[in-house]
């Protein structure tokens, strides 16, 4: 590997690498573009003094783009390069970086597992941490990380742990700049990390251009944090160019509703205030067993069958929908699992060798009877007049089930108004331009620009004055 220094700007230039493409295939490794590096380094040092004694930690150094960016920033300002410690697990990256920056004695590269190594007293930490979901971790890694990190909860991603460990590595008043997917702002898995961050000073959250990494990273976000207990407001830079200042919640709840339309939400009732239920539909854990085309349903099973619908069957271009499938439900109206003696033909069907074997593969059978659903269906609420919407959609759209007979599947959310006589009025508002604008601003993004509609967002949807007034009147004794 050859390297050279461009004397005009101090940038380290790669001339050639025969195995460059191999680097890109490593687990969790995504190269940070130079323009993003420069933006992050600027945020890292903005308003501060940098000297040869300044200590910087590059957590998960990869091939050293942040080292390059820091050197470039210092050379451009006539400053000495600070002491940069690079933590990197992959030996190929370590060899590459040592060769690339061999002419810089203030750069130290350590071959180590960052998450399993103690780090402390750094003035700055910068990183584009590896994005590795729990499904790609070994059992040994899961067992090792869970007791070490508060953020290693549920279906965690490694970048959450890097975030937590890097904050711990900062000295008092030190600053951290990370680039990650925006999901940590709102997913339940990142609740513990949000609680940690809320106790620090989150200076800024900038949602950068969606195409910054090409198609490799969905909705990248740069977060700047100072290790102090200040409760200053956070500056949020949105992708549409708007800027807002917000107080982040301390309880770990989603930050996203606080980023947009804050002034609309304050002092108003929310959708949750006028509804008894806002939740995803039934999760059987084996739809291939419990869901049939209605026309193919054996007559002996019809007493246990309810019309059902999945998200893919809701067409956002149409105002109505058709029901072609039924769900077999081994539960009573109050969510009680029926005893085998009360299942008749349904028990015979479920007990067949192939069907039972399929049901036994579900994780829920570790804690529930073998024919139970993954989640217990609350039929006394499901079988009420309700409003339906897809969990993932290009744009929000809502439909009404006035007859209260549909059991939605887990890809459909259902909304049960407290007052069923107002269901059309509520649905009309949900389909209004005002509500759609709010949802498009606050909903999590899925791939290709689709929205992920979730109950915790729907519950916070502000409702207009005329609906709020009626809700207050309804609540009066």
Image: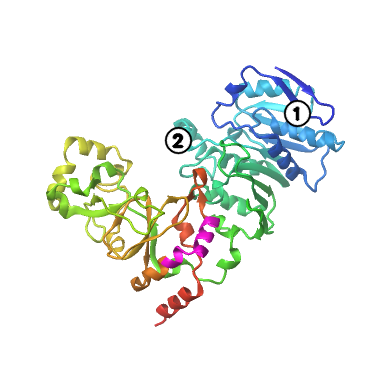
* Residue 322, image x, y percentages: 29, 54
Magenta highlight range: 428-442
Q: Which residue is mark 2?
A: 135
| Distance of label 2 from label 1 (alpha carbons) | 34 Å
Instruction: Indicate left or right for 362 with 146 as reference.
Output: left
Residue 370 visible from this viewpoint? no
Q: Which residue is mark 1?
A: 107
How many discs mark residues in the rendered view?
2
Secondary element type, mark 1:
strand
Of badges 2 and 1, the one in the foreground is 2
Up/down of 77 relative to 228, above or below = above
Q: Quadrant of the N terminus?
A: top right
Between residue 175 and residue 449, name the one nearer to us: 449
- Sort mark 2 into few (<14), some (14-19) or many (20+) by Cα contacts within 10 Å: few
Instruction: Indicate left or right for 54 with 389 as reference.
Output: right
Label number found at residue 258: none
């Amino acid at each position: 590997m050859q390297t050279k220094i461009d004397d005009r700007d101090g940038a380290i230039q790669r001339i050639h690498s025969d195995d460059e493409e191999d680097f890109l295939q490593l687990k969790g490794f995504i190269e940070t573009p130079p323009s993003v590096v420069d933006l992050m380094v600027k945020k890292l040092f903005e308003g501060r003094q940098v000297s040869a004694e300044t200590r910087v930690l590059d957590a998960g150094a990869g091939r050293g783009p942040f080292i390059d960016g820091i050197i470039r920033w210092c050379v451009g300002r006539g400053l000495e390069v600070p002491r940069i410690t690079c933590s990197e697990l992959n030996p190929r990256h370590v060899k590459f970086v040592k060769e690339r920056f061999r002419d810089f004695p203030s750069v130290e590269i350590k071959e180590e597992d960052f998450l399993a190594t103690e780090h402390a007293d750094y003035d700055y930490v910068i990183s584009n941490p590896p994005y590795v979901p729990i499904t790609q971790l070994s059992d040994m890694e899961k067992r090792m990380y869970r007791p070490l990190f508060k953020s290693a909860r549920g279906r965690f991603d490694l970048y959450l742990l890097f975030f937590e460990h890097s904050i711990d590595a900062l000295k008092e008043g030190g600053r951290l700049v990370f680039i990650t997917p925006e999901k940590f702002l709102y997913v339940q898995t990142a609740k513990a990390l949000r609680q940690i961050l809320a106790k620090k000073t989150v200076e800024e959250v900038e949602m950068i251009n969606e195409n910054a990494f090409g198609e490799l990273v969905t909705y990248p976000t740069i977060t700047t944090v100072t290790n102090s207990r200040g409760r200053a407001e956070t500056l949020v830079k949105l992708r549409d160019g708007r800027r807002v200042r917000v107080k982040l919640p301390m309880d770990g709840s989603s930050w996203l509703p606080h980023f947009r339309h804050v002034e609309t939400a304050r002092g108003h009732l929310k959708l949750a205030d006028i509804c008894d239920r806002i939740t995803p539909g039934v999760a059987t854990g084996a739809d291939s067993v419990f869901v049939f085309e209605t026309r193919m349903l054996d007559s002996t099973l019809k007493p246990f069958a309810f019309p059902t619908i999945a998200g893919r069957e809701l067409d956002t271009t149409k105002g109505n929908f058709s029901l072609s499938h039924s769900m077999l439900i081994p539960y009573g109206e109050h969510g009680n699992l029926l005893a085998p003696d009360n299942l008749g033909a349904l028990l015979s069907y479920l007990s067949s060798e192939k069907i039972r074997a399929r049901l036994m593969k579900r994780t829920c059978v570790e804690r529930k009877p073998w024919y139970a659903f993954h989640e217990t269906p609350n039929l006394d609420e499901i079988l009420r007049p309700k409003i339906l919407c897809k969990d993932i959609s290009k744009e929000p759209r809502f439909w009404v089930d006035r007859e209260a007979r549909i059991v939605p599947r887990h890809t459909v959310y259902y909304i049960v108004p407290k007052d069923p006589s107002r269901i059309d009025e509520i649905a009309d508002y949900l389909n209004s331009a005002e509500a759609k604008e709010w949802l498009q601003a606050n909903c999590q993004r899925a791939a290709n620009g689709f929205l992920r509609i979730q109950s915790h967002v729907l519950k916070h949807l502000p409702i207009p004055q005329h609906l709020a007034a009626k809700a207050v009147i309804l609540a009066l004794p």
